[in-house]
Image (cartoon, rainbow, N blue to C red):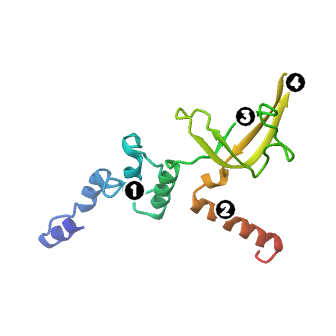
Amino acid sequence: MAGDLVAAMIGVPPVGGATDAMLRPLYQGTLLAWHAVKSAAREHNSGWSRFFEYMADSPGRAYTIAAMMALRKGFHDTRSWFTHEITVRDGAPYVIGETGHWFLGDRIGATAPGDDTYTIRIDRVRELTLAWDRDQFPEWRPIIGDPTSNKDRGQRTLDMVSDLVSGVHELGVLA
């Protein structure tokens, strides 16, 4: 635009639009297109074995609300959490059930499958599934910890709002 104004004052034909069309691929999507954020607290608490880089999938441009939600999701995806599922055979060594050693809602400790540190994580049993077939003994599959806490707080809030809106629609309050 500035080139067109100068050209109009001198009497030269304007070429700003053509120049802009040629240079647009070089500057569009590059200036302020990247957004990098560091969590100093997480870096301090994680030691040398932390994630050094994580590229969050962003649906659009940097420095927008969508980019902030992508950053929140990136922080949420890389946090530590302790929900895990194990497989336990009934009666070996504990009896599972309401009259047994533990059942739904009871606190138990177990090591997460694949955890090389063998850390015993203690939390409540949130789900309990009994699985068997003709060739195997019955096995319980408890989920230890709260699987809904693995969702982002913002996502949980949006889920609650959508449930509320659908309930209001079912009541016929809103059309």
- Give the labeled residue for mark 4: 134
Q: Amino acid at mark 4?
A: Arg
Residue 87, label in figure: 3
Residue 41, label in figure: 1
C-alpha span from label 1 to label 2:
29 Å
Task: State whether residue 70 is above or below residue 120.
Answer: below
Under circle 2, the secondary element is helix
Residue 159, label in figure: 2
* Nearest to N terminus: mark 3 or mark 2: 3
C-alpha span from label 1 to label 4:
52 Å
Residue 113, label in figure: none
* Nearest to N terminus: mark 3 or mark 1: 1
* Nearest to N terminus: mark 4 or mark 2: 4
C-alpha span from label 4 to label 2:
40 Å
Question: Which one is closest to the eye, mark 4 or mark 2?
Answer: 4
Question: Which one is closest to the eye, mark 1 or mark 2?
Answer: 1
